[in-house]
Amino acid sequence: MKATFKTIKNKNDNPTLADAQKYVGGWVELVRLNDGVLIINEEGKLKDLDLNPEASKLFSDSHGHTDYICGPAIYIPSSVPSEWHG
């Protein structure tokens, strides 16, 4: 699966759980960042999905170069109201 990247720009574009699962192609995992959250495929590495450079950079900016993200990702900045920020 291609490593696509989507940024949510306003609260009206917030994905439902079903929307997020469809976009990432499976079970979702929420990754907290300093300035928002990423919604990714929980099994992205296990399924050998493509590296997602945009999502990996956001992860590294928040957590250092400790890991990387594979597969499609949805980014919701903390400036956008969302139930995903929890």
Image (cartoon, rainbow, N blue to C red):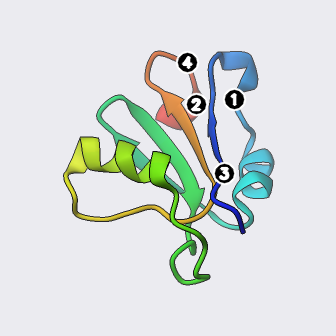
**Helix, strand, or loop for circle 3?**
loop
First along the sequence among labels 3 and 4: 3
Q: Residues within 10 Å of mark 3 (few under 14, many from 20)?
A: some
Measured Cα–Cα span from mark 1 to mark 4: 9 Å
CA separation in Å, label 1 and label 3: 17 Å
Is residue 25 positioned above or below 23 on the image?
below
Q: Residues within 10 Å of mark 2 (few under 14, many from 20)?
A: few
Sooner in the amino-acid sequence: mark 3 or mark 2: 3
* Residue at image point 62% right, 19% down: 9
Q: Could you say whether the residue bearing mark 4 is in a helix, strand or loop? A: loop
Packing grade of label 4 (10 A; few <14, some 14-19, many >=20) is: some
The residue mark sitting in front, 3 or 4, is: 3
Label placed on residue 4: 3
Which type of secondary structure does the marked residue at label 2 adopt?
helix
| Residue identified by numbered label 2 | 83
Q: Is 62 on the left or on the right of 31, as rendered? A: left
Mark found first going from the N terminus, 1 or 3 = 3
Location of mark 4 (residue):
81
Which residue corresponds to the image point at 26% horizontal and 42% vertical from the top-left? 62
Q: Residue at x 37, y 42 (%)?
A: 58
Question: Residue 81: x percent and y percent?
Answer: 55, 18
